[in-house]
Image (spheres, helix red, strand yellow):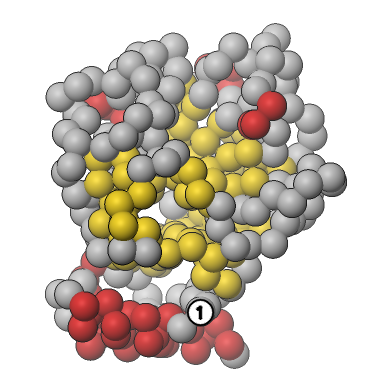
Amino acid sequence: MRHFLLLITLVLNTTLALAQSTKAGEWIELFNGKNLNDWKVKITGHPLGDNYNNTFRVEDGKMVVRYDQYDAFDEQYGHIFYKNPFSAYLLVMEYRFVGEQVKGGPGWAIRNSGAMLHGQAPETMGLQQDFPISMEMQLLGGDGQHERHTGNLCTPGTNVVLNGKLFTPHCIDSKSKTYPANQWVRAEALVLGDSLINHIVEGDTVLTYEKPQIGGGNVIHYDPAVKKDGQLLKSGYISLQSESHPVEFRRVSLFDLSPYMNKPKQLQAVLRELQNRKKK
């Protein structure tokens, strides 16, 4: 395993970003720019499939989160899940925060969203469950006053190994810059099963951890049968959040790396090719 991770590290160096397809058929446009047919919505207090108050929608070719039909937020945290689970991949998102937070949203959720990685199946979430058991690549926008890193890690119902030690606090900041509101930001998550996860912002690797596993707190009203503490997470669902601030995604794409996970040399070559594409 250490030899495998060394190969990956040598290829990644400090940056890895995808710009174009390298081989036909390996890119998956999770968001097709037209509709949400491949996605499932789960909002706290509402059954799976109830897109309460049209929270998630498509406008001008973008997947957006809107609150214009809300009177107040009332802790109705939402997630929109892609229909299929994945194990090894590079997820590419381009996002920005717009407008003002809806009335009743918590202070910490201003210009706050996220991509949930290796999440539980949406069908297994409780009606009142707030967040899926998953690792969150937290996406933040600047508030014009404070430093606010993006690409952070939060862990609803999970733990990870960070710098060789089990990390049990809820969140840790990345080393990214602060990006102001309304600016499009490119964020990527390189996920290699349960062996390695990198958070990448604008081409820079800003956080690295390994051995994602179920455990810890910071999730409520879950089914105890689903929360099997200590179980490594080798795969799961990807979802995007609605946490009370309007946000837009103009791209949500995925490059599937699972065919190469048992072929380290081929994986190394694919990652090198992707990195070279970025430099051209």
Q: Quadrant of the C terminus?
A: bottom right
In the displayed orientation, state which residue is furthest to the right.
144
* Vertical side of 191 occupied by 277: above or below: below
Q: What residue lies at 60% left-to-right and 62% top-to-bottom?
A: 175
Q: Quadrant of the N terminus?
A: bottom left
Label 1: which secondary element: loop
* Vertical side of 116 occupied by 130: above or below: above
**Who is closer to the viewer here, 259 or 113?**
113
Q: Is residue 64 left or right of residue 142?
A: left
* Vertical side of 158 occupied by 223: above or below: above
**Who is closer to the viewer here, 58 or 126?**
126
**Residue ID for mark 1:** 14
**Mark 1: amino acid:** Thr
**Who is closer to the viewer here, 80 or 37?**
80
Q: Position of residue 232 (x, y in %)?
A: 19, 49
Q: What residue lies at 26% left-to-right and 37% top-to-bottom?
A: 215
Q: Position of residue 193 (x, y in %)?
A: 25, 60
Residue 172 seen in render: yes
Q: Residues within 10 Å of mark 1 (few under 14, many from 20)?
A: few
Query: Which image quadrant is residue 116 in?
Result: top left
Q: Position of residue 226 (x, y in %)?
A: 19, 29
Q: What residue lies at 45% left-to-right and 35% top-to-bottom?
A: 80
Query: Which image quadrant is residue 134 in?
Result: top left
Q: Is residue 90 left or right of residue 250?
A: left
Residue 95 seen in render: no
In the displayed orientation, state which residue is furthest to the front.
165
